[in-house]
Image (cartoon, helix red, strand yellow):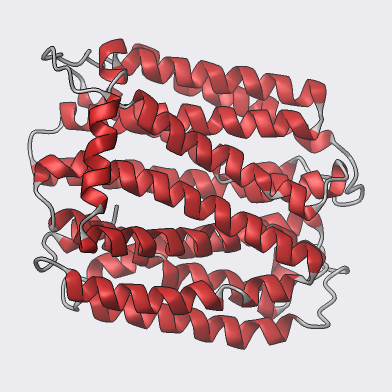
Amino acid sequence: MNPIRITVALACSYFVFAIMLNSVGTVILQAINSLGVTKTDASVLEGFKDLSIAIVSFLVASFIPRVGYKIAMLAALVFVAVMCLVVPTIAQFWVLKALFAAIGCSFAVMKISVYSVIGQVTDSANKHSALLNTIEGVFMLGVLAGYWIFALFIDPNDVQSTHWLNVYYLLALIVAVAFLAVFTAPIKSPELKGSHYSQIHAFIDMLRLAYKPLVLIFIISAFLYVLIEQGVGTWLPTFNNQVLMLPVDVSIQLASIFAAALALGRLVAGQLLRYLNWFSILISCLISMAVLVLLVLPMTHNVDGSQVKTIFDVPLAAFMLPLIGFFMAPIYPVLNSVMLSSLAKYQHAAMTGLIVVFSALGGTTGSIITGLVFDKFSGQHAFYLTLVPIALLLVSVSVFKKHTLKPLSHTTSSAEQ
């Protein structure tokens, strides 16, 4: 087995999906501008993506090992590549719904396969954590690259043009590169033990686990966090364009700061967690998020960035708002780390299922609510609304702390994931 070639294959696959999964905010903005879709209707794209991830993760988790991880990964890449080639030829909103449903389904298969293959090529907890962090780091690079790739295909002088859909031809080519990397990688088929453990048993285990007070409050906390992150991240390009009046390409490029802030926040938190208590860090982050919203949003009133030509000319408020990602970055991975370290190892799979499902529901809810408020009131009202889940998260994290069964262990490596 060649671990380097396998690592390259996993990284390429994750890079591709990082671009497409996190393009939903850009696609929403472009669907509004070039396809005449309302903000409320455009917000459902998040649901097509997230709910597909949740449903398929549950349905195929125990089936993928029987098919083989390599075949599953190749099938996921082919499915997405075909959809990328279809989208520009049809250029209608319904095909974008189908695209994000396909992306969600394929990513569910890819994530299960990638996480399983990592276990094949590592022989210690430290090596596993190191490789997983590397793959997740590549994912963040894909998120950053995605904003700039889409911006290259957008005509700032003709916002109604559908020429931007040609970006999917380039993405299909990138998927093809990932396909070749996976195809040539020596990924082994998993050893089957003839277990009759089915999806029904997995679902029952998840329900039993949800009865625990610690798990229940964790689910609520995870739901609220993803609601905030997806609500802000998905609608930030539209906020930049329609509230700050920035050109479309600059609006999308500027949103990449949010992804960069998330990445930096995780790296910094990974170091701080060596010395500081996780609860203190999370409470500080939540308060900082609320303060930033209250300070920055008033600065966005009466801003006219229509004359801006490059990202270096945008007003200060446009740079400050994405920085909320720096403070929200540690919350989700730290909560996951505390939760998993409080359970026996045999319960981790069921807990992961709950995390995926409720994270997807939170992301969909956040995007739809933000879109509704943005459409009916204003972008400022939509982003002020994040103060509600931030306040609720302060309460839920405090309750979660009280119900924690044991102190956080291996915090740093977990938090960086």
Q: Quadrant of residue 201?
A: top left
Q: Quadrant of residue 277?
A: bottom left
Q: Residue at x 74, y 59 (%)?
A: 238
Q: Is residue 74 visible?
A: yes
Above or below for 184 versus 145: above
Tell me if 331 is positioned left or right of 160 in this view: left
Q: Residue at x 18, y 70 (%)?
A: 403
Tell me if 255 is positioned left or right of 247 in this view: left
Q: Position of residue 90 (x, y in %)?
A: 81, 23
Report the front residue among 218 and 303. 218
Q: Residue at x 52, y 39 (%)?
A: 51
Q: Quadrant of residue 66?
A: top left
Q: Position of residue 36 (x, y in %)?
A: 88, 45
Report the front residue among 364 and 269. 364
Q: Position of residue 382 (x, y in %)?
A: 68, 70
Q: Is residue 278 visible?
A: no
